[in-house]
Every structure is written in structure tokens, then in C-alpha cells.
Amino acid sequence: MAAVWIAKKIVQKAQQNGLLNNVDVSLLSDEQVYDLVFQPGFSTAETVSEVSGRGVGMDVVKRNIQALKGSVEIQSRKGHGSIIRIRLPLTLAIMDGQLVRVGQHIYIVPLISIVESMRYRSEHVNQVAGGCRVFQLRDEYVPLVELSQLLNISSQYHDLEQSLMVVVETEGGKVGIVVDELLAQQQVVIKSLEQNYRKVDGISGATILGDGTVALILDIPGIAQLAALRGNRTASAFPGQESVVIAQLKRA
């Protein structure tokens, strides 16, 4: 049985909560005793506070980990402390993202790539050779990428003065991505685009949002490269096929 110094209190609380009725506790293994910690409503706190005592913590943790096809376990030794070990599939990747909207479509920009965001101002925009436009950002010029043009989708605004610009950093420097609206920041689980559809330039993957909609994750270096190769003209990374991509990912 698990070490008496910690198991005794866990078992006593579990018996008080009716979790061990008609069970010989002396036969419980360490794993079975520690697993009681993850039962809904279980808590060893003597009093309820703002942050503990309600028993709605560890059961939620375990449920969410299992939903990701992972596992969690507790190990403890007197005088050494406790270890909570979480295992997640190697194919699972989670990242912090900034949700942006262009027309009716939601995209995700990796938060680690974002330098700053600001309102688009035409007086700070200059046209350069090759049809590319640059934005004067203090003492430097940042190439502009209109996401609506690059991905061949309709923007909400015909006047770019109403748009926003997300400045991102790539290996070759900074790029300003023009979008309609900045939404929330959140952690997202990445689904592979290549496994569920095919490789798409400028898109690194996709995720399913809380409301069930699919959002594509932008590949920032790929976006910058596409814009450089195409001079920011209305050439799409996947012309007319976004609905196909989303349908494939929903079925995956």
C-alpha cells in the first residue's frame, strides 16, 4: 500500500466521501490510492478557500489530459516529495496563437512571431519596384502582405484605412500582415495539414476552435516567402480550395 504518511489522509477522506464503501483499503495499491486524488469532488483540504477545498481541480486536469489521449499519475516518497507525471502523445503540439479575422475566415498567427500590432495608415505606405508596398515603421521599412489577396479571399473592408496590421518577425526581417480584425489570444492544438490534406504553402497546420470551426495556422516564413515571390499580387496560396481543406480537416 502507498506510504502511510500520505495515504492515510487520502483514504480517510475517500471513505468520508463514500468512495471506498465495501473496499478493503489494505489491499489497495499505491496507484489506486493516488488515483483517488483525481476523483470528482475529492479534496483533503480542511476548509474551503478561494483556491482550494472544492475538489474541482485534479479531476478536471485528468479529464482534459485523457481527452488529448494522454495520462497522468502521482508518485510520492516520504522525505523526497511528490511527482506528478503527465504523458502526452508525441504527435500532439500546442502553441500560443493570436486569432485574426479576414472577411469571414479566422486564421491563427503564432504568438511567438508577433512583434506588435497597429492600425494601417496609408500615409506611411510607399510603393517600391516590383509592385511591393512597404510600411514605414519608425526608422525601418516593413514589407506589407495583404492576407486577403495572398489567400484569395474577400476582405471586409475595401478601404485599408479600416484594417489592422500585425507586424511579425521572420528570419529575413519583419513583415506587416494586413487583417480585418484582431480577436482573442489562446492556446491551440495543431492538426497536421499534410496528413489530412496536403502541404500548402503559407499554411503550417490547422486547429479546431471551441465552437467547432476550423482555423488555419499561418506559416510566417512561408507567408513572407510567398509575398516576396509574387510581389504581393493577387496570387493565392490555394486558390478556391480553402473550403476543401476545412472539410477534409473536419472529417479527420
Image: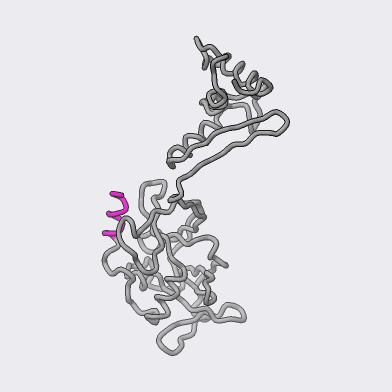
Residue sitting at x 36%, y 47%: 212
Is 249 inside the magenta-drawn segment? yes
Horizontally, is 105 left or right of 73 in the view?
left
Residue at the far top: name it. Answer: 22
Q: Quadrant of residue 157?
A: bottom left
Q: Which residues are magenta?
A: 243-252
Q: Position of residue 191 (x, y in %)?
A: 39, 53
Principal secondary structure, stretch drawn in magenta: helix
Q: Is residue 207 visible?
A: yes
Q: Is residue 41 visible?
A: no
Colour scheme employed for the rendering of this structure: one colour
Residue sitting at x 43%, y 83%: 132
Where 48 falls versus 134 (above or below)?
Answer: above
Horizontally, is 150 left or right of 72 in the view?
left
For the N terminus, the image quarter is: top right
Where 243 falls versus 170 (above or below)?
Answer: above
Q: Position of residue 120 (x, y in %)?
A: 50, 73
Q: Position of residue 204 (x, y in %)?
A: 41, 62
